[in-house]
Image (cartoon, rainbow, N blue to C red):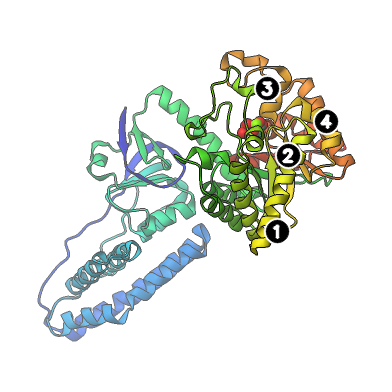
Amino acid sequence: MLRLKGKGVSEGIAIGPLCFYKRQTSDIPRYETKDAAAEWQRFKDAQQLAVEQLGEIAEKAREQAGDEAAVLFETHAMMTEDLDYEEHIQNSVENLKLNAEAAVKDASDFFADMFASMDDDYMKERAADVKDVSARIIGILTGAGQGGMDSDVPAVVAADDLAPSETIQMDKSKILGFATEGGSGNSHTAILARTMGIPAIVGLGDQLKQLTEGCMVVVDGRSGEIFADPDQQTLDAYKEKLEAHIKHRKLLAELKGKPSVTKDGRSIKICCNIGNPDDIQFVKENDGEGIGLFRSEFLYLGCSDYPSEDYQFEAYKKVLEEMAPKEVIIRTMDIGADKQIDYFKMPHEENPALGMRALRISLTRPEVFRTQLRALFRASAYGKLGIMFPMVASVWEVREAKAACEKVKEELRSEGIPFDENTSIGIMIETPAAAVMSDLLAKEVDFFSCGTNDLTQYTLAVDRQNNDLGRFFDPHHPAVLRLLKLVADNAHKEGIWVGICGELGADPELTQTFLSIGIDELSVSPRSVLPLREKVRSSSVKEL
Ligand code: PEP
Ligand code: MG
């Protein structure tokens, strides 16, 4: 097995034979023309034909890759007739008496060098467009045919570089992936590959020369790796990934923008769990309907000292602004247990999972809590915020936490700092105590979100960190499911919504159960949104 590493510019996995792109190269003739007027006319005819060809390619691109790709070739057609470009060629033909092919080649070099020397990365890449357009005109003038891939079966296309027009003109059903020596993430070929959903790796340089025509390759367009003649283990692992990838792409195409509603009309909200503001791109990509759990402790874990109010404010504001008008539930920090932070200087505990963690820390360190609440309420002015407290066991804890919120709101009011007076306040149901007391807790808050990871741990007295406990950690245990039903019933009696944000929420085996007990929201990792939506849309509450 041989492993090559380049730059992955279009995600996805391809497995298949390698096929080198064949180009019909012909030397570009260079001679002194006797009849400059005839030579100029020869160029004009070739230019006209190139424009017509590019128009046809634009139409093909529109069908295969959408309007954006079509515009690229319409732009190429315009470049072909660009006045500066044409003037450069005309000068070479009429004044320097150069033949048309050489005149086009010189203009191509001149403008490509000009673009390549620009500072802007995007403009640099336009050098490839000028070369592509010029190669087409020269090809028409010399009568050289089109290049192509010579394979009867779908293959990974390898080339030194590929021009956008070469990429779009290949039979898409035959292309599994692209692997090129040159190129960059900004090149139009990379952009086209992404639009067409074809995995691509560029910048492989001379490594590509080690591969032979027809050898079996695995292309990982995300990591930028190519495995040639892969061993069985690598092949099996990638086949599995490929299957999952194909399924996910299918779901994306079918379900993005569609409602999460059962066959008999029952809606459930499918939101996402995130750990930092950058995760929002995945939420958007996967069509998350909001953020059901932002684990704010990851901000603390990423700092070497307590994060300041402003630092936190910026992070929360970014998430709220980017998700608006969708709701964002931010959980106050859940430090402790498995998430220890040096600068918190927590004393050693025999049983950290039962110790000073989450809301217990917030209530015993009011200054740390206040800083976070100020940042949260300030950010509430920029979107739809819900604040959620973790690890609640008693009603008094919630009352104290709410009192801290009121104090902060009062401060902000007196400082004239805007915030959303209607910011909703919720709690996580993660302890059996909270589940059992959910009738009273429901009177205190606007929503519940069940943290089934901890709820399972504390209900079954099974350490969630201990892999050896295996089947003893059973979130499907009737004790956990009964608690969830109790919590849902109590929430609805008080007219508040109830969600699940633990891993169990994404378990398709329980989707029907969750629908039947009336769960209103599931918050899961971004990649689970669409599989879950598919499951919901094929379910029916009445059938349960
Ligand atoms: C949970 O306990 O289910 C939960 C969502 O919180 P965390 O996993 O962060 O403890
Ligand atoms: Mg938890």
Q: Position of residue 373 (x, y in %)?
A: 64, 48
Considering only vertical position in the picture, is 523 above or below 461? below
Residue type at mark 4: give it.
Met
Q: CA distance from mark 3 to mark 2?
A: 18 Å
Q: CA distance from mark 4 to mark 3?
A: 18 Å
Residue 60 in sight here: no
- The residue that mark 1 highlights is 420
Residue depicted at x 31% and y 49%: 21
- The residue that mark 3 highlights is 457
Quadrant of the frame with the N terminus: top left
Q: Position of residue 310 (x, y in %)?
A: 53, 53
Helix or strand or loop: what does disc 2 sit on?
Answer: strand
- The residue that mark 2 highlights is 427
Residue type at mark 2: give it.
Ile
Left or right of residue 139: residue 369:
right
Residue depicted at x 20% and y 71%: 110
